[in-house]
Image (cartoon, rainbow, N blue to C red):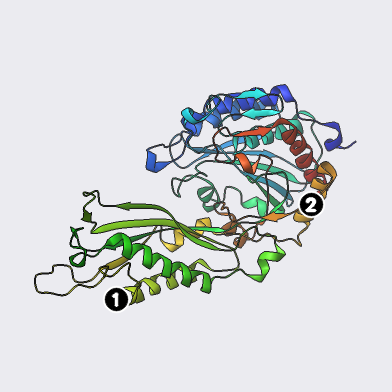
Amino acid sequence: SSFAKDTTLDEKSFITLLGKLVGESKHLQNNEAQGLIPSEIKSADHVCEFLAPYSGKNGPLIVEKLTYVKDRPNVKITYKGSDAKATIGIVGCHLDVVPANPEKWIVDPFKLTVKGDRLYGRGTTDCLGHVALVSHLMAALAEKKVKLKRTVVALFIASEEGGGPGVGVDMVVKHKGIAELHNGPVYWVDSADSQPCVGTAGSIRWHLHVKGRLFHSGLPHKGINSLELGMEALKELQDRFYKSFPAHPDEKVYSFMCPSTMKPTQMESEKGSLNQIPAKCVISGDIRLTPFYDMKDVYEKMEAWVKDLNDNIEKLPTRGPMSKYVLEGEDVDVKRGVLTLEWGSPLEDAREMEGIACNMKSSGFKALVEATKEVKGKATPYAITGSLPLVRKMQRAGFDLQIAGYGLSKTYHADNEYCLLSDMKDAYHILSRLIELNE
């Protein structure tokens, strides 16, 4: 008999576990800038409690907490197969969430609300729904004592939503916590829309610091307007970026929705009076880089461009007859506007967020397409310029990494986040079938 045909997701049990996980989501919010440091032990403990009847003395599952920072564990679950050299990995489901502002929600974000097929709550789509889903899959393997050749390893990770390295999957890989997964396909389950995701983009954060000269706005010819200088410099940097990193032919092969982009997302200036020309401003944003370009090239080019703009600041377009970026006169303390580029992280740390082009020729990918087709009726692989941590690094380290996810992209990181119970039931069949097809 077929494990995939004989098993379905227990709706009541799934909703109960997901309810416990979403009930902790207030303590799982991850945004260091807002002072929100998640305590993933709270979600990890619910998983361990749910799997207790199937692990240790009670059953064949091996459940381990891999902890590198106090109260912030990763959870590894192993179901042993007969061949010590063959594996299948389900990784990337994470135990933290992005922040939620209850005032903007129609339901309590930190409590699971069931409305028909919709399951509302922070983390339902990204990614506590997947944690509950894969926990049930591993429990079913143990309960039914399914005979497999391949060992199935699930890894739930900490600190996926930010907060820097040193906590999550980067440490697990560094400490060889999933070294055995080189022996088979690895499915990163944290995308959306129930279709295979074959590509992601790298994410690079940048800050452009602009220094001008403070002066009364009634005498604009005596000041250097940092806002005007910043906007003109940014336009020039964007023009150069799009010439150097245009749409790449391989983006069509992978069905990328967007090419590489560079854009501002925030702007701050000195809080002076409205009748003062501001001396300082900071424009910040990100670069999304498709995996066919190298991050190192972006770092080097951007740094060279900013140097060139500083050397030729008087050649940048100005705004109106009194706007200028170079001043003369003995009593002028600031004679030139200055641009300083600051990266969100050093290149080596940025590489943790590099984009990936999955291997579409591997048997692991073919199995994902086949399982998706069988359950959903069709498989439509896509690529997105969203970013996932460490996927490229793992691919470089020799893992056959494939990406899937079963929440909804339209509710990802959104207010009133929800997933569909019907999608999670289908996902259970897809993942069960994946295990069989890879046998």
Q: Please provide percent x and percent y for residue 6.
A: 86, 32
Of the image marks 2 and 1, the number of the one nearer the N terminus: 1
Cα separation between marks 2 and 1: 56 Å
Q: Is there any visible trace of residue 389 in the rendered image?
A: yes
Q: Please provide percent x and percent y for residue 127.
A: 60, 38
Nearest the eye: 196 or 115? 115
Crowd class of label 1 (few under 14; some 14 to 19; many from 20; radius 10 Å)? some
Instruction: Please give the name of the residue rendered at 26% of the width and 58% of the height, measured from the top-left corner.
Output: 280
Instruction: Please give the name of the residue rendered at 40% of the width and 65% of the height, measured from the top-left corner.
Output: 234
Q: Please provide percent x and percent y for residue 200.
A: 61, 56
Q: Nearer the viewer, mark 2 or mark 1?
A: 1
Vertical side of 418 occupied by 394: above or below:
below
Crowd class of label 2 (few under 14; some 14 to 19; many from 20; radius 10 Å)? many
Image-based side of 3 in relation to 308, left or right: right
Q: Residue furthest right?
A: 1
Kindly identify which residue carries mark 2: 369
Quarter of the image that includes the N terminus = top right
